Image (cartoon, rainbow, N blue to C red):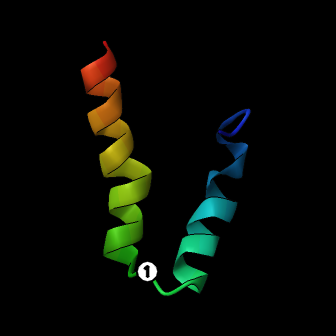
């Protein structure tokens, strides 16, 4: 868990560095967040 959204660029970079495609990283960073947010409100 991150204290704020300032850490997201570092997470995105780390996901790409371990071999995830930009599309897959985008799903994790945006798609999954949107799904969890929608389910929680």
The quarter of the rendered structure image containing the N terminus is top right
Residue name at image x 56 percent, y 83 percent: 18
The local crowd at label 1, few if under 14, some if 14 to 19, many if 20 or more residues have their Cα within 10 Å, is: some
The spot of residue 22 in percent (x, y) is 39, 76
Relative height, residue 32 to residue 35 (above, below): below
The spot of residue 10 in percent (x, y) is 69, 63
The quarter of the rendered structure image containing the C terminus is top left
Q: Nearer the viewer, residue 40 or 30?
A: 40
The quarter of the picture where residue 28 lies is bottom left
Residue name at image x 56 percent, y 65 percent: 12
Relative height, residue 20 to residue 34 (above, below): below
Give left or right: position of 15 versus 20.
right
Residue name at image x 37 percent, y 49 percent: 30
Residue identifier under label 1: 20
Give left or right: position of 1 versus 27.
right
Relative height, residue 40 to residue 34 (above, below): above
Residue name at image x 33 percent, y 46 percent: 32
| SS of the residue under disc 1 | loop
């Amino acid at each position: 868990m991150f204290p704020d959204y300032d850490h997201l660029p570092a997470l995105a970079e780390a996901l790409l560095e371990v071999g995830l495609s930009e599309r897959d990283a985008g799903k994790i960073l945006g798609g999954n967040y949107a799904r969890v947010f929608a389910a929680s409100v």
